[in-house]
């Protein structure tokens, strides 16, 4: 038994944000029916291809545990299938450009067909000056406050590697869908769930909006620039690698940094363990010295302190340093490369990393479900080939008889793959 067993999702998502959401729902047991345009399907199938003619990793890693039906929703017969799918499903999820869903399937029509249906959408922006814009990951990172607060004070704004605009918003939407399903248990009615990528990013940048308001009451003392005597402007500055929680933290070099771009460690000089830090780095007198003993005294000497810490970390690999520091509960974290993460066997044991076999591309590694439910384990099933389940869905989900299926196939609504199959 899976948490979302019995819930059927009509999945009109594409690229990254929407597919992240429906993949999570599929891992929790929902039956996700991905509707794709005949011929091409989700555009990511062919993007950033590494194996010729095989669905890209971009697609396969975002579309596990789904079924695929090809359907031209602009074809009259295709529209009949669409209406039947709306009746048969619980949730419709989409991340089309603004206005597309209203043209394809207005909310009023959905309610007529299936008043219990939940319609969940991702857009770049909510209502306002930018609502008509098409939005991609980095646009959302920039508009949501992440880029202006990421990077070093004297450098360009930076986007982050974590896909907080796309995958982050997909995650937000999944929560909204589950909440709406829960409400439907009591009301019997569907509702619309929307999440704008700008809003999702801003939600993840909440602490920076906190700092924006703190600025009105004086400088942000935990930012390195305070200790360096550099005045603050009227907006939250980029904080480099400072930690957002108020405990000074930096990235320091470890043994091998000259040749290994990831031989670094994040080191936090957390106040409660300051004395242990002094012992580990060989500066026991800093425990009682007036320049170092109190957190407030240390703020103007962070460069000196982290240089000393780095002298120590440079004598150790990041893993050796981790082992030593963890013994004393000194918070720190190795900068792990994707290669190191992919080789970490413990992540395979928890299912966070999984090896998946694919009939065209062969075996690959993917990220499994990062959310673990003790009574609803997730098994990762390979992504569907384009239109792989078209006939199965028409027959088993919509209960269409062979004559009707043949009629739909001949209308062209299912595209070439199905017409060939019928011949
Ligand atoms: N059959 C027939 N037509 C279909 C179809 C199907 N199965 N699926 C989609 N279409 C049509 C739509 O009806 C629409 O046609 P219309 O404009 O004539 O009404 C058309 O395809 C375009 O779809 P759209 O989603 O707008 O694609 P796009 O390439 O123009 O835009 C994005 C791509 C990502 C920019 C846009 O979808 C968007 O802004 N999405 C919201 C934000 C988002 O999720 N961005 C991040 C993506 S990771």
Image (cartoon, rainbow, N blue to C red):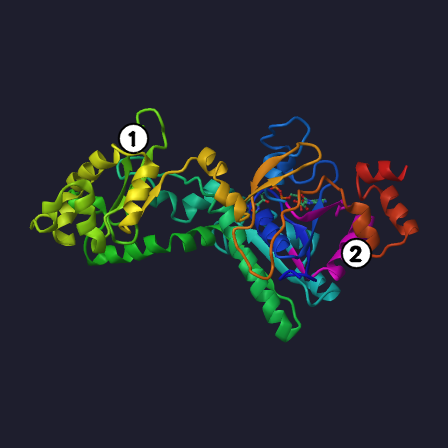
Q: Which residues are magenta?
A: 64-92
Q: Residue at x 41, y 40 (%)?
A: 160
SS class, disc 2? helix
Marks 1 and 2 sit apart, C-alpha to C-alpha, by 59 Å
Nearest the eye: 79 or 15:
15
Q: Is residue 69 magenta?
A: yes
Point out the residue furthest to the right here: 403
Quadrant in the picture for the N terminus: bottom right
Q: Is residue 419 left or right of residue 112?
A: right
- Above or below residue 376? Residue 276 is above
- Above or below residue 87? Residue 225 is above
Q: Position of residue 335 (x, y in %)?
A: 37, 38
Point out the residue furthest to the bottom here: 186
Q: Residue at x 58, y 31 (%)?
A: 48
Q: Position of residue 394 (x, y in %)?
A: 82, 51
The residue tagged 1 is 255
């Amino acid at each position: 038994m899976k948490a979302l067993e019995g819930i059927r999702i009509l999945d009109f998502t594409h690229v990254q944000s929407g597919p992240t959401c429906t993949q999570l729902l599929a891992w929790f047991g929902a039956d996700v029916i991905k509707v794709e345009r005949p011929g091409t399907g989700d555009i990511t199938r062919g993007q950033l291809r590494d194996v010729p003619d095989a669905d890209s990793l971009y697609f396969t890693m975002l579309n596990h545990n789904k079924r695929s039906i090809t359907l031209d929703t602009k074809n009259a017969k295709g529209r009949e299938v669409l209406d039947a799918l709306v009746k048969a499903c619980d949730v419709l999820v989409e991340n089309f450009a603004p206005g597309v869903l209203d043209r394809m399937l207005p909310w009023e029509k959905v309610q007529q067909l299936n008043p219990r249906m939940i319609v969940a959408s991702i857009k770049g922006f909510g209502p306002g000056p930018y609502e008509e814009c098409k939005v991609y990951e980095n646009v959302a990172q920039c508009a949501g406050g992440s880029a202006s607060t990421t990077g070093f004070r004297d450098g360009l704004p930076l986007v982050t590697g974590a896909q907080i605009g796309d995958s982050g918003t997909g995650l937000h939407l999944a929560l909204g869908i589950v909440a709406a399903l829960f409400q439907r248990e009591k009301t019997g009615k569907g509702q619309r769930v929307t999440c704008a990528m700008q809003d999702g990013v801003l939600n993840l940048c909440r602490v920076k909006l906190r700092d924006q308001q703190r600025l009105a009451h004086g400088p942000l003392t935990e930012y390195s620039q305070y200790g360096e005597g550099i005045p603050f402007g009227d907006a939250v500055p980029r904080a480099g690698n400072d930690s957002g929680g108020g405990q000074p933290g930096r990235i320091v070099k470890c043994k091998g940094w000259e040749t290994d771009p990831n031989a670094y460690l994040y080191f936090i000089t957390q106040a409660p363990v300051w004395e242990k830090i002094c012992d580990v780095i060989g500066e026991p007198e800093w425990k009682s010295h007036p320049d170092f003993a109190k957190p407030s005294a240390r703020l103007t000497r962070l460069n000196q302190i982290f240089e000393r810490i780095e002298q120590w970390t440079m004598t150790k690999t990041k893993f050796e340093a981790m082992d030593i520091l963890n013994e004393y509960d000194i918070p720190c974290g190795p900068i792990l490369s994707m290669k190191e993460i992919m080789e970490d066997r413990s992540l395979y044991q928890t299912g966070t990393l999984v090896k998946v076999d694919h009939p065209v591309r062969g075996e690959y590694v993917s990220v499994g479900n990062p959310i673990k439910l003790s009574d609803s384990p997730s098994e990762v099933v390979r992504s569907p080939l384009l239109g792989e389940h078209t006939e199965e869905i028409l027959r088993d989900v919509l209960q269409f008889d062979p004559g009707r299926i043949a009629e739909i196939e001949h209308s062209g609504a299912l595209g070439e793959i199905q017409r060939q199959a019928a011949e």
